[in-house]
Image (spheres, helix red, strand yellow):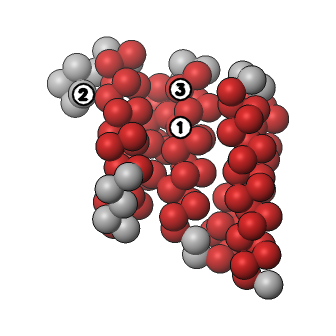
Amino acid sequence: MLGRQRNIGQIYLNISAVYIQRSAFQNSQRYLEIALSLFQKQGDEQNLLSAYNNLGKIYENQDKWKQALKYYKKALAMALQLNDTIHSPIIKANLGHVLINSNDYTEA
């Protein structure tokens, strides 16, 4: 049952990513919230960090820098905790991009 729910969560995560690419952020967030709920119930940290990163993307694309930072930092903390060397640099780049766009050069 857990494997099935994980797969369903990943499907929602993928649908959300498609909506991000199409700049349909409200739809993307709706599917992402479903995926987040499933991943949280399962304790699936790997997919949670991807979901948090996608939430950061949604807010970044809407120039909502504080919210984007919040979710990118959550994603990065999880990636570092999991020793995820694939996603960590991507999330760090996303964080840097938001910090620069929000004129926070000292933290960037």
Say if mark 1 contacts mark 3, CB within 8 Å.
yes
Q: What amino acid does circle 3 point to?
A: Glu
Residue positioned 74% across, 62% down in the render: 9
Residue positioned 35% across, 33% down in the render: 93
Say if mark 2 contacts mark 3, CB within 8 Å.
no
* Residue 70 horizontal side relative to residue 97, left or right: right
Residue positioned 53% across, 26% down in the render: 60
Q: Earlier in the sequence, mark 2 or mark 1?
A: 1
Circle 3 is placed at which residue position? 60
Above-or-below relation of 86 to 98: below
Spatial CA span between label 1 and label 3: 6 Å
* Residue 11 horizontal side relative to residue 75, left or right: right
Is label 2 in a helix, a strand or a loop? loop
Q: What amino acid does circle 1 point to?
A: Gly
Circle 2 is placed at which residue position? 108
Circle 1 is placed at which residue position? 56
Q: What amino acid does circle 2 point to?
A: Ala
Q: Quadrant of the N terminus?
A: bottom right
